[in-house]
Image: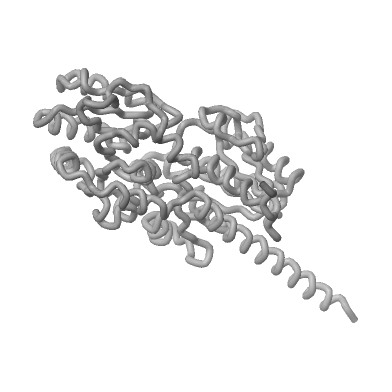
């Protein structure tokens, strides 16, 4: 196979994130890095510290740059040194602490690299951000970062609307670009046996949840909904992910008498094998940006139920056309939706077709097109400035 053609203005792309621990934002940065390299761009995946399960997913064509810092803010100086030495055309950052550090490093390095901030969630949605001093300071820092960055990528229209209304990000530097969540290898990975006895033929249907075990993911609501639905039919619940809420969720399952039918196996590197065999996938989040796991479940042909949280689920499901939408925190409505979905399984081919809208190659190309436009625009402005300076000095 011949090598992909190199792009014109965009030659080197840097993607900066604190680490590669098991979050959706980190996984999307790895996917963008891999997809960009396949499209002929030299790609550096720059991390404050090289740690996390997604390290194993970084392909050899992507150069991993470990700054050896303890975290994003500690990486400001080493990142500035990297930018001065390597001079990437564009740096993409994601997650608030990393984006603030990236803009500070760019300023220290002289500002030659185009900086694009990727916003993965509705930033105004955290109620604690208005009362907790640390979070209020973070919000102020992000407001400045949005203002100074050359571009801001919102992962859904809901996120874009939030950035316009609450952070005054102008349309000229704001784009909605979906996440590259449906990779070319998804079908092959979905076909692999998950090695879990509950997914064997003849077993009761499995309700599946995927995400970090933290309150905003709504797993407490999912557990209550499961308990209600299980009282009416044989069911099991599997939640893939890790986090601080594990002990609380396990204790709750014990108290409701459903622990024998609830499994929290932790982080797994191939959730698609589970999605392809689940009876229904449930997204129970209180808020999201663009929930990739919901799209990936659909790409695996799995029926879905989701909270109508801000933002993403309604956009993905086209207002409920491709799966039930229920109010945030309403366990009864969620249980009823689980029942309805198991009783009347939707067209799996239609679910896969909708998920194809988020094809990784197409989404990555859209990102690279935007980045190249920014590089060309900056180059044109500099050339115009040089011409004006020469005209003023020419007698």
Tell how many labels.
Answer: 0
- Figure quadrant of residue 80: top right
Protein image colouring? one colour
Decide which of 16, 233 is in the foreground and name it.
Answer: 233
Q: Position of residue 170 (x, y in %)?
A: 48, 65
Decide which of 227, 297 is in the foreground and name it.
Answer: 297
Q: Can you name the residue that lies furthest to the left here?
A: 232
| Residue 107 as seen in the image, left or right of residue 179 | right
Q: Residue at (30%, 20%) from the top-left corner?
A: 197
| Residue 119 as seen in the image, left or right of residue 340 | right
Q: Residue at (22%, 35%) from the top-left corner?
A: 221
Q: Is residue 276 visible?
A: yes
Q: Position of residue 228 (x, y in %)?
A: 13, 32
Q: Position of residue 54 (x, y in %)?
A: 52, 32
Does 227 appear above or below 371? above
Quarter placement of the C terminus? bottom right
Q: Residue at (20%, 18%) from the top-left corner?
A: 254
Q: Position of residue 385 (x, y in %)?
A: 75, 70
Decide which of 293, 187 is in the foreground and name it.
Answer: 187
Q: Can you name the residue that lies furthest to the bottom here?
A: 395
Q: Is residue 310 visible?
A: no
Q: Residue at (68%, 57%) from the top-left corner?
A: 7
Does 118 appear above or below 257? below
- Figure quadrant of residue 248: top left
Does 385 appear above or below 143? below
């Amino acid at each position: 196979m011949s090598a992909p053609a190199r792009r014109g203005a965009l030659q080197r792309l840097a993607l900066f994130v604190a680490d590669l621990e098991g979050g959706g934002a980190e996984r999307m940065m790895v996917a963008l890095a891999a997809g960009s390299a396949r499209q002929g761009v030299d790609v550096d995946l720059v991390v404050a510290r090289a740690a996390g399960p997604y390290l194993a997913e970084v392909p050899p064509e992507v150069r991993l740059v470990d700054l050896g810092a303890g975290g994003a803010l500690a990486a400001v100086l080493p990142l500035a040194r990297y930018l001065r030495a390597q001079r990437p055309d564009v740096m993409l950052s994601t997650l608030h602490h990393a984006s603030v550090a990236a803009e500070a490093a760019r300023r220290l390095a002289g500002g030659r690299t185009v900086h694009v901030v990727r916003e993965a969630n509705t930033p105004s949605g955290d109620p604690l951000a208005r009362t907790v001093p640390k979070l209020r300071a973070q919000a102020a820092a992000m407001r400045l970062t949005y203002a100074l960055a050359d571009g801001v990528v919102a992962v859904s229209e809901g996120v874009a609307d939030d950035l316009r209304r609450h952070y005054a990000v102008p349309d000229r530097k704001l784009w909605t670009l979906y996440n590259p969540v449906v990779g070319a290898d998804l079908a092959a990975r979905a076909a692999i046996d998950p090695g879990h006895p509950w997914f064997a033929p003849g077993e009761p249907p499995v309700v599946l949840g995927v995400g970090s075990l933290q309150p905003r993911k709504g797993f407490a609501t999912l557990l209550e909904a499961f308990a209600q639905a299980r009282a009416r039919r044989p069911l099991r619940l599997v939640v893939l992910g890790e986090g601080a809420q594990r002990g609380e969720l396990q204790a709750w399952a014990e108290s409701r008498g459903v622990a024998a039918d609830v499994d929290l196996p932790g982080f797994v590197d191939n959730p698609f094998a589970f999605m392809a065999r689940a009876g229904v996938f449930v997204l129970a989040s209180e808020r999201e940006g663009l929930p990739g796991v919901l799209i990936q479940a659909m790409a695996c042909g799995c029926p879905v139920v989701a909270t109508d949280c801000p933002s993403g689920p309604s956009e993905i499901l086209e207002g409920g056309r491709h799966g039930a939408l229920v109010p945030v925190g309403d366990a009864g409505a969620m249980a009823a939706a689980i029942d309805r979905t198991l009783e009347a399984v939707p067209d799996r081919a239609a679910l896969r077709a909708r998920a194809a809208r988020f094809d990784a190659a197409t989404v990555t190309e859209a990102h690279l097109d935007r980045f190249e436009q920014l590089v060309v625009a900056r180059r044109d402005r500099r050339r115009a400035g040089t011409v004006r300076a020469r005209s003023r000095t020419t007698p």
